Image (cartoon, rainbow, N blue to C red):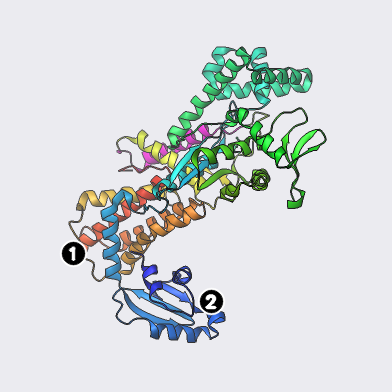
Amino acid sequence: MDFKKHIAANIKAGDLSRDEIYAMLALPPNTEMGDFALPCFKLAKTMRKAPALIAEELKNAYPADDKLVSEVSAVNGYLNFKIDRAFWAKETLGEVLEKRDRYGASDEGKGKTVCIDYSSVNIAKPFHIGHLSTTVLGSALYKLHKFLGYTPVGINHLGDYGTQFGKLISAYKRWGKKEDIEEGGLRALNALYVRFHEEAEKDESLNDEARAYFKKIEDKDEECVALFEWFKQLTLKDVGKIYELLDVHFDSWAGESFYNDKMQPVIDELTEKGLLVESEGAKIVDLEAYGMPPCIILRSDGASLYATRDIAAAIYRKNTYDFYKCLYVVAYQQNLHFKQFFKVLELMGKEWAKDLVHVAYGMVSLEEGSMSTRKGRVVYLKDVIDKCVEKALSIIAEKNPSLENKEEIAKTVGVGAVIFGALYNNKIKDITFSYDKVLNFEGETSCYVQYTCARANSVLAKGGRAQGFAAENILPQEFEVVKQLSEFPSVLKDALDKYEPSYIARYAVDLAQKYNKFYFDCKILNAQEQEKNFRLALTEATLITLKNALSLLGIGVPEKM
Ligand code: ARG
């Protein structure tokens, strides 16, 4: 039941639509004032009256026989509503307990396909902490879209094309050993890459050799292609382990090289439409009129670029999936790149260019300092996850030595901490990852939320599940929980509209905090029968909702902790 919608339908303010009023209804900071409030100063201009007067008039006009609303008041230009709390509680808990793991789900996205390009790793390059955000943000957006009825298509736009593979072949042939690479995987490949750069600084000719090898890959030389495929398999095997830990999945692995044979039609079309111009030997699309540097389509040596591939990829995705939206979860450093190629598509007359969205996010750094791939100073994501799991294990072992399955639980807690740490802040913010912060059991963390779930589980194990419940005389602490529970569907909708999984993470912490306040203030197991039943139902509804929230972020919940 959407209480806001119900109230909005009963207010007639000037010629404002129901949706406009709905959007204006706010949650007052303090529930003593009311459960919803309409700030009337926003109406003063159009209604040409003082806010206080408008509030008074609207109050008098509100239908007196509305059973849902127990009180309407006009205070300082605000029109405040109190909802009948027992009714609200009954409706909300009833809905959560009935829908269970589907609570919050909807079919608003029915029939709409949304392509989501995320993680998009580079072959033979380290999978480092810089890839954390795109991976977990993209995956959360994937799960969220699915939950709200969309058909998401997860795409890993592999970085599997470029001169660096020529460098790698050169380095491998000079210094590599098959067994070492088989064994060391991505890290061994990266070590070769680093060595290449060191040696090339002393000996320029190495770069020519690398270029020649790259050309050989392009010309489908058997040996070079086989080596490249091997590098690719090693990379995918290594990152696959991380995806499994993080519960991340893809529907398509079409990477940059997939578009090798799909760029010529793009170049033809650009030429035909008079968009391609020559500049210093290169072929470009001039974007000066839009305040941007030109988008380079072909280099002077005829090679295509990152943008050329992205243009071909967007067209391919539109033709293949007929997407409603196509999201690119990529760091803000690439803002210009996305602006440029979106504009090129628009100039090509693709009306769907407006449906391409760059979901930009900020940088993640580690407290210990920055890194550089070329110099080999890399913070591998796998190491960060392992360290978090290890730390989680020692905390759990200390808190609860007799707990069974500690290893398994530490994995869920440690991995959750990494994901939640990356998703908790507004995505555009740069963040510094801190082990102590993400594993603080009293902080705004996933382990705090997981711990609250374990608490709820233990209450339910002792008290049993409520067999029906009546809602009467709701206490403020109980009501705070109910209200928060009822917000879940609209939080999910906002999170999707703004591409902000952080809303879900914050929501989970808020709900856990409100439940814990209730837990410490109110007896549950020793309460009278009717109260006990209501509180057990409240506990179960909280557990269900917290689990749903965390699972949308890719985080599991242990029974016990
Ligand atoms: N592999 C690229 C990088 O690491 C990201 C690719 C993002 N996706 C895209 N369609 N451009 O920078």
Residue range corresponding to the magenta coloring: 378-403
Which is nearer the eye, 14 or 515?
14
Q: In the image, what residue occupies the spot 28% across and 58% down? A: 95
Q: Is residue 390 magenta?
A: yes
Q: Is residue 421 visible?
A: yes
The image quadrant of residue 489 is bottom left
Query: Tag 2's secondary structure?
Result: helix
Left or right: 495, with 213 as reference point: left
Query: Tag 1's secondary structure?
Result: helix
Q: Is residue 353 magenta?
A: no
Q: In the image, what residue occupies the spot 63% across and 34% down? A: 309
Which is nearer the eye, 485 or 7?
7
Circle 1 is placed at which residue position? 530
Which is nearer the eye, 357 or 463?
357
The residue furthest front is 272
- Residue type at mark 2 is Lys
The image quadrant of residue 217 is top right
Q: In the image, what residue occupies the spot 30% across and 62% down? A: 92
- Whether ligand 1 has any atom under 8 Å from the Cβ at mark 1 is answered as no
Q: How far is the residue under mark 2 from the one under mark 1?
A: 44 Å
- Whether ligand 1 has any atom under 8 Å from the Cβ at mark 2 is answered as no
Query: How many numbered badges does the structure rendering display?
Result: 2
In the image, which disc is placed on residue 140? none
Q: Position of residue 321 (x, y in %)?
A: 49, 40
- The quarter of the image holding the N terminus is bottom left
- Residue type at mark 1 is Gln
Circle 2 is placed at which residue position? 42
